[in-house]
């Protein structure tokens, strides 16, 4: 388990309930980027790409969003009621389902996030947090590694460990394979439930 410290609890609990022995070795940490308010009153859509982004925007929110789109169920749950969760939990999936014309759109995400929606919708972008890649002194041995972000994949590759991995989704899979990591499974729904299902398919 490589999720940031404090964000692993539910997944660890669920995996242990299925009979798996779980070791947590965080490979990333989340660093908020300031405290300045984010004014959303002038936007027709606010797009959230992660639960971390949802929590950070909630903390810094000024105004009331007209409509909120969340990429992934966990992102929507971190925010509260949302207007749209695309069937495919990627920026491409959201772009395919977002009503047109979308009006003014704000993408609230991590520093360095993909700019597909910015380019396609002429959206504004606000970076809310930074994902810092960690270097553990020694990566623990195991049968499977769970990777829930591209940054975790890159950090895992630097450890030199050779344990195969399950990825949370296509972006993470691409980053992992680019870094030379063997991916043996990918979550069909790009969230906690999807990771659990992928582990079940592989290990039972």
Image (cartoon, grey):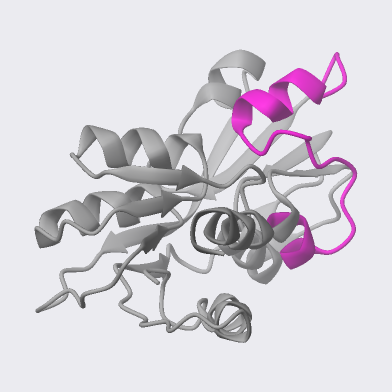
Residue at image position (72%, 29%) is 94
**Which image quadrant for residue 191?**
bottom right
Q: Position of residue 19 (x, y in %)?
A: 55, 83
Image height of 60 relative to 180, above or below: below
Q: Magenta span has 91?
A: yes
Q: Is residue 95 left or right of residue 13?
A: right
Q: Is residue 18 visible?
A: yes
Q: Quadrant of the N terminus?
A: bottom left
Name the one closer to the observer, 140 or 9.
140
| Residue at far front of view | 204
Image height of 126 relative to 76, above or below: above
Q: Is residue 176 left or right of residue 40?
A: left
Residue at image position (64%, 57%) is 197
Q: Position of residue 7 (x, y in %)?
A: 52, 76
Image height of 126 relative to 52, above or below: above
Q: Position of residue 148 (x, y in %)?
A: 46, 56
Q: Magenta span has 63?
A: no
Q: Which residues are magenta?
A: 75-102
């Amino acid at each position: 388990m490589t999720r940031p410290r404090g964000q692993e609890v539910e997944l660890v609990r669920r995996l242990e309930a299925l009979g798996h022995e779980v070791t947590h070795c965080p490979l990333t940490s989340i660093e908020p980027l300031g405290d300045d308010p984010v004014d959303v009153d002038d936007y027709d859509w606010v797009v959230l790409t992660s639960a971390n982004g949802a929590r950070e925007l909630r903390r810094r929110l000024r105004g009331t969003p007209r409509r909120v789109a969340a990429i992934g169920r966990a992102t929507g749950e971190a925010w509260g009621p949302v207007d749209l969760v695309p069937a495919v939990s990627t920026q491409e999936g959201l772009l395919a389902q977002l009503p047109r014309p979308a009006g003014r759109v704000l993408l609230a995400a991590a520093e360095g996030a993909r700019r597909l929606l910015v380019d396609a919708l002429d959206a504004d972008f606000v970076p809310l947090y930074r994902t810092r890649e960690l270097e553990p002194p020694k990566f623990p041995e195991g049968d499977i590694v769970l990777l829930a972000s591209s940054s975790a994949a890159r950090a895992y590759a630097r450890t030199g460990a050779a344990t195969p991995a399950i990825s949370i989704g296509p972006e993470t899979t691409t980053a992992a394979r680019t870094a030379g990591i063997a991916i043996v499974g990918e979550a069909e729904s790009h969230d906690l439930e999807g990771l659990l299902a992928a582990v079940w398919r592989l290990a039972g």
